[in-house]
Image: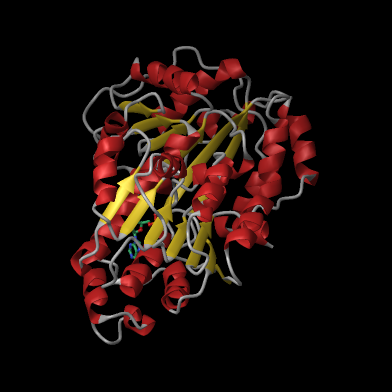
Amino acid sequence: MTSESPWSQLGLSPQILELIEKAGYKQPTSVQSQAIPLVREGFDVLVSSQTGSGKTASFVIPTVERFQGKNGTYILALSPTREIAQQTGAVFETFGAPLGLRTVVCIGGASIPVEKEALASSPHIIVATPGRLCDHLERGNVWLDFIQCLIFDEADRMLDMGFAKQIDIITEQIPKERQTLMFSATFAPKVEKLARSVMRDPKEVTIEKTVESAPKIDQRLYWLDEGKKMSALMRLAREETGTIIIFAKSKERVFQVWRALHDKADDVIYIHSDLAQEQREAAIAEFKSGRYRILVATDVMGRGIDVDDVAHVLNYDVPREAEDYIHRIGRTGRRGKTGMATTFAIPGKDDAGIRAIEKIRGITNERSEEARKNDQRPQRNNRPNERRPDADHQQRHRGPRPARERLETPKTVAPNPVMSPPADILVEKQSGIGFLDWFKKIFS
Ligand code: AMP
């Protein structure tokens, strides 16, 4: 790495710079250039960031460098889901192992005795989901007295998942003299409350919008009745030739959607919490490898999927929490690519959910009230086949589609599954306001 490399400006050791080069990270992302120097200096740091921003390396790189050479378990990273914990563990391995640091990942679904043994070997770093770590604490398999750096990854999500109590139990057992780093996509009041209780005078980092990092997501909202969703889904799956993640509200719905698609094509897979850990990992790996083009998932499962090139996110059901909308559509439009996000909403049933999404995005509701009235009226011009994804998008995401059966056109086309365009959401598209602007609005 040359001395002109932007990485060299961050004051990192030559050994770390070499590892960064090996990882292929040409230049630091925005969150990395802002957070790394603060973490290296030992400050508590509160970071607004989302998956895909490079946030994991922004806490892994400076912490392994900072605590290198010490004995004992001194870094604890808490992750909301097993998949995120595993990904974080892998990044700690990449940068920590060459420095002689051992990482243990503790997650629900894995073997308790195996984890117990790994914990007994005094690893330098523990990455865990809060529930599983509490389990080990209760069994006396682990002590946290040595921890000097506590990391909350996706804090909002952990709280949304009901981990507040476990977080309390864990933080009580960690020395007060420590560094605390907190990463969160949103700063909801409960996140601020947690930050106030566990952090000391934190430095705040908010990722500025940059051309490369701002996800470009073309968002569409279709108002349609429950009975029309399936045919609209079939149409979308047929017209979109790139990869698709479909979010549904429950395990049953995931299975229902999967089964309907699977009847037509064999490149569809699903994940939900009834599947064993290995099955989920295999499903995600096969989706990433391109063996499967369409993945159907619940929110919790979808959260941990780190795939570079998802062309389209479909919210088959409006998410229960508005924040989930942000997390869901963040699966597409990553790393400078454009993505599509389509939401199916049921008039009358999902109005409040859509309003909450509009609110979290900082969009006023004046036009949407009018749009909602229009939504109820049949409008021939807004059929889904007349709102095809733009050719550019198709071109960019058209991968080497495996030669297998494609979805058939439904024989009977729903008379009018798509209602008026979502004025509020299209306003965002027309005015060119980026996805990150929503985040800024949430934070302000
Ligand atoms: P994260 O936001 O931590 O989930 O990271 C998203 C993806 O970005 C991961 O696949 C990382 O390997 C990758 N990544 C992180 N930092 C960089 C960087 N500076 N340059 C290129 N890729 C990166």
Total number of numbered discs in the rendering: 0
Q: Is residue 233 above or below residue 77?
A: above
User: In the image shown, does 149 or 254 lie closer to the viewer?
Assistant: 149
Q: Quadrant of residue 291?
A: top left
Residue 221 lies left or right of residue 278; in this view the side is right
Q: Residue at x 30, y 58 (%)?
A: 91
Q: Residue at x 29, y 61 (%)?
A: 124
**Residue 3 x %, y %:** 27, 87
Farthest residue, direction top: 412
Location of the N terminus by quadrant is bottom left
User: In the image shown, does 344 or 394 lie closer to the viewer?
Assistant: 344
Q: Residue at x 40, y 65 (%)?
A: 59
Colour mapping used in the image: secondary structure
**Residue 110 x %, y %:** 30, 35
User: In the image shown, does 29 or 235 lie closer to the viewer?
Assistant: 29
Location of the C terminus by quadrant is bottom right
User: In the image shown, does 152 or 327 lie closer to the viewer?
Assistant: 152
Q: Is residue 306 visible?
A: no
Q: Is residue 430 visible?
A: yes
Q: Is residue 382 above or below residue 434?
A: above
**In which quadrant of this rendering is ligand 1 seen?**
bottom left
Q: Is residue 244 above or below residue 178?
A: above
Residue 339 lies left or right of residue 383; in this view the side is left
Q: Residue at x 43, y 38 (%)?
A: 302
Q: Quadrant of residue 112?
A: top left
Farthest residue, direction bottom: 3
**Residue 181 x %, y %:** 49, 64
Farthest residue, direction front: 140
